[in-house]
Each structure stands twice: as structure tokens, then as C-alpha cells.
Amino acid sequence: MIDRDQVLHVARLARLRLSEGEVETMTGELSGILEHVDRIAKLDLEGVEPTTHVVALQNVLRADVPRPSLAPEVALAPAPEPLDGAFRVPSPQADA
Amino acid sequence: MAGLLELTVAEAAAKIASGEISAAEYFEAWHGAAAGDELNAYLWQVEDPANYEVEDGPLRGIPVAVKDIFCTEGAPTTAGSRILEGYRPPYTATAVRQLDAAGARVLGKTNMDEFAMGSSNENSAYGPVLNPWDRDRVPGGSSGGSAAAVAGGLAPCAIGTDTGGSIRQPASLCGIVGLKPTYGSISRYGMIAFASSLDQCGPLTRDVTDAALLLAALQGRDPCDSTSVGIEGGIAAPSREDLRGLRFGVPGELSGDAFDAGVRENFEATLAKIESLGGEIAEVTLPSAEHGISAYYVLAPAEASSNLARYDGVRYGRRSENSADLLEMYENTRAEGFGPEVKRRIMLGTYALSSGYYDAYYGQAQKVRTRIAEDFAQAFAAVDFVVTPTSPSVAFGLGEKTDDPLSMYLNDFFTVPMSLAGIPAISIPSGLAAPEGGGPELPVGFQIAAPAFAEQKLLEAAYALERGIGFEARPEGVDG
């Protein structure tokens, strides 16, 4: 159903680093689950409207009125590395 | 103090309102009971309840155990995950604020499957919760801590979340009442997202009256959640005494091998009880329900893979140390912070949404969802309710299903279709049955589903049936 290369590709898309062991178990487990799920891929559902949302709501709007929000220092407090009103992160390039 | 703990929430609230008991002494009694938690039901408990002021309202002085998926300002909120270890949210979920406004207060935060992904509570990063009926068995999940706390005499009531059965199934396995309201009845603001089109908050209580009391306080439209609409007319205490004039539909697709013999026997006895109370049993068909699990295990992981992209070590939670660059930091943080089930679902969801597979999986699953909603609409044209067992078996053993994710997923067979259709469903205890492998008898749950926003009618029927069944059993050592 799904092979090792696909697992590694999907893991990259999901920003997950998997260990060798995880790649192996994931390949087997995902294949088993997909085999079950594959039943719906084979159903003839031509013309059926997809459901994205179960409550009949459209364009829920509110008045555009300014109201207080979290203070910057409160919003930054749970961050692993807040810095001068911003979130500090490692450089996007290893050598930079 | 045992006398106080035996009261239902409705009884205690009445006594507090009349001044017969004080809010402080009632809260203290539960605070003491919760401190004796041997089930790993709590991840955090309030330290000094004496300092808490309570509002005047229908829940004045009532302690509530809150699933650790609800943000509580200043108090730890982990969603059962390592990646949120140490996180203290800067705001409180609307559901919890509404309980506060009604006079209730948080007793503690309850253990759960990581990010609500699981049916046994074994996926918590903080260890499994034990079932108060048999500590070698699971309490169900993902709201297992909330269910075990109420069943185990550690809280008078609790709230949880249900995405595919996460309130109803643990309520069933622990012998209490669990209600998943219609999608949109309660705000999701501040409720950590798993699958946003399915997630719904609801109460776990000792009886149906208490479930109604909590739902009355929880429901409502919230400007912070544009998908919330509330329940028109609110919720009143149920009082119906019989089931005359009501039709209960049993899906014809419920075949004998779908569930254990003990569960089947109890289900049939409960149908007979409905008839003895004047209700009518009819057969309905839900032809697409058999594809519910497949559709659910595409849709929920797909939404989860998107929702959980936010845990990247930048704004909150844990960050992996010593990463050479930003990408490595993301990948290491997520590898270290997420447990195996969460990784599995992120992978499954990312795969289902990836280029080339989207139409075959996600698109098809959305169409199956339409079909299942149509099945229910058709059934409700002929009957008032659809009924099933809540879970195919009684509580299973710790570790029994952890090696086989698919068999764990099939636990949600009876609860997932209602979630996909967005309709309300309640599980009430309907008796005890012996597990397949033998051993002492354990609770069985009976599920009743109703049309969208028909909560009052659902609660009335559940109340009459609850009185008819007269379920009195409690785990050893638990009063009340």
C-alpha cells in the first residue's frame, strides 16, 4: 500500500524526523490502515456533494470594532525563546 | 464527609442554593477526594480552594473536572502531550468560562489520550488512566481521565471532548453518562483542536439530570467561535416519566458479530425495557454507516495534520535543543514532542491530503460523510431516535490492543457515524456484562442519537429510560 520512500516523503512534508525503527513500523501500520480505508476510494460517489461542515452557516460576520487583545509580553510568555517582543529561532540556514 | 460525595450535582446545587450546605465545605470535600487519586485520572489539581470566589448561579459551588484539552489561564494545559509540557495558556476556554459564570469551578485537569487521539487513554504522555471498576483495564478514551474521575468518586462531574466517540465510549466503559451535543452547540474557543469539523465539548456525569444541568451552562453562541450557534430555547431539567409515543430505531446493519455476546444481551434487554416504558422499537437502515470508520480515519487525521502543524517549537511548548538550523529544529521538536499515535495520525493525514491522493481519500471521505448524514435524516423521518450499544465490548485490558492500531480504531464503530453527521448522542449505563475472556462484570453503555439540536428531547428520553433501568452499581469503594 505504502512503501518506505513514500513514508520518508510524507514525513518530510509533515516536518517529522522518524528513526529507522519508526520508518519500518510506520510503513507496516499505515499500509494496514490504508487497506481498510481504501474501501471508500472504490465507492461510486459520483454526483454526491462533499460535506465540509455539518451546520448550515454561511459568512458569519461580526462588527469590525476594535477590542483589547493579549498584551505582547503575555502572548510571548509561553514561548521557548522570546526576544525583544519577538520569537527567536535558529537560522534558516545552517552556515549563516 | 462521605454524605456530601454521594449527592448528585443537581442535589448538591439545590442544597447549596438553600444554604443547607456551604459551597466551601462541598468543594473542600471533593478537593479531598480528588487528592486521593490512584487512577492517574488527574494531571493537575487546584492547590488552595479556599482562595476561590464563586459566582452565584445554577452551578454555584460545584467542582468540575476539566479535560486537559481546555485552556485554563495560568494553569498547566498539556492535551496529554510532551510537546505542551509546562505550557500555561494566557487565556481560558469559553466552555470553562461559562461554567465559572454559572458558579462552578475547576477542580483539576484530567488525563487524556494525547491530543484526544485514542480510545483507551494509553496514548497519554503521562501514563494510562486506570478503570475504577478494574484497575487492570482501560477507562476508554480519549476523555478517560474525566470518565474515571466521575466513576471513581474523584469528581462530581466532568467535561470532555468527543471527536469520534471520546465522551461516549469512556462514559460507557466507566458506567456513567456521557453526552456529545450537536456540533455547534458549545463553543470550541480555547479547546485545543484535533479535528475541527468534528470536535465537540460535552459533559460526563453520574446521571442524565446532571448532564442537562451542565449542558445548560455550557451551550451558547460565542463570538470567538464562528461555528458555534448554541441551542435555541436553552436546556431545562428533564422530567419525562415514560416513553409513550416515541419511536426508537435499531439499525438493521447491527449484526451479531459486531459486538460481544454480553453487550448484545444487555442491548436486547434495554430494548425490552424501552417497550415496557411504552416506547416503540422499529428497524431503520444506515447503509453508509459501515464506511464511517474509513471516512473518519481519513478526515480526522487530515484535519489533525493541519491543526498540529502549529507545534513547531516557536511560540509555545517545548523546543528541541541544539538544532543546526530552523528546519532541523522543527523536525527534532516534533519528533521528540509527539507520541507514536499522534505521529501515525499526522502521517496518515498528510498522506491523505498529499498531491495525487486527495480526491481518492479526502474527497471520497467527505462524500461518505454526506451519505451518512442523509442516512440519519432518512431514519429520523420514521423514528425519533436511533439506538445502538455505545461500544462493541466492555472495558478491555491495558495493553490488549496497543499493538494493533486498526483494532483500536474499530472500537469507535458505533460512535463515529453520529460524529460525522454532527448530531447529538448520549451514552447511559444500561447494566453490567462479563467480558469475553471472563472475569467480574463491567458496565455496558446504551447509545441514543437524535436529530441536530434535539438535545432536550434526547435528554427527556434518556432520563425516562435511566429511571426505568435503575442502574445502581458502583465500583468497589465508591459511594453514591
Image: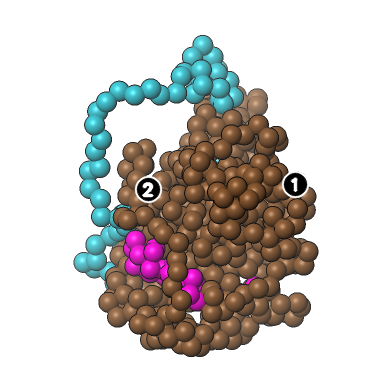
Chain colours: A cyan, B brown
Residue extent of the magenta highlight? B443-465
Q: Which element is circle 1 on?
A: helix
Q: What residue type is disc 2 on?
A: Gly
Which of the pair B290/B376 is nearer the observer? B376
Dividing the image into 4 quarters, which one contains the C terminus of chain B? bottom right
To the question of a shared chain for discs 1 and 2, the answer is: yes
Numbered label attached to residue B269: none
Which residue shows up at 62% across the image and 44% down it?
Answer: B23
Q: Where is residue B225 in the image (x, y as percent from the top left)?
A: 36, 42
Crowding near the residue tagged with mark 1, few <14, some 14–19, many ≥20 C-alpha atoms within 10 Å = few
Most extreme residue toward the top is: A84
Mark 1 or 2: the one toward you: 1
Which residue shows up at 69% across the image and 56% down it?
Answer: B5
Which of the pair B312/B192 is nearer the observer? B192
Chain for disc number 2: B
In the image, residue B408 above or below residue A68: below
Can residue B46 be found in the magenta stretch?
no
Can residue B449 be found in the magenta stretch?
yes
Answer whether residue B427 is visible to the viewer in this image.
Answer: yes
The residue beneath circle 2 is: B220
In this rendering, position of residue B80 left or right of residue B191: right
Which residue shows up at 65% across the image and 78% down it?
Answer: B432
Q: Distance between the residues labelled 1 and 2?
A: 32 Å
Q: Position of residue B382 (x, y in %)?
A: 29, 80
Which residue shows up at 45% across the image and 61% down it?
Answer: B237
In this rendering, position of residue B346 left or right of residue A23: left
Q: Which element is circle 2 on?
A: loop
Mark earlier in primary sequence (1, 2): 1
Numbered label attached to residue B32: 1
Which of the pair A32/B195 is nearer the observer? B195
Q: What residue type is disc 1 on?
A: Gly
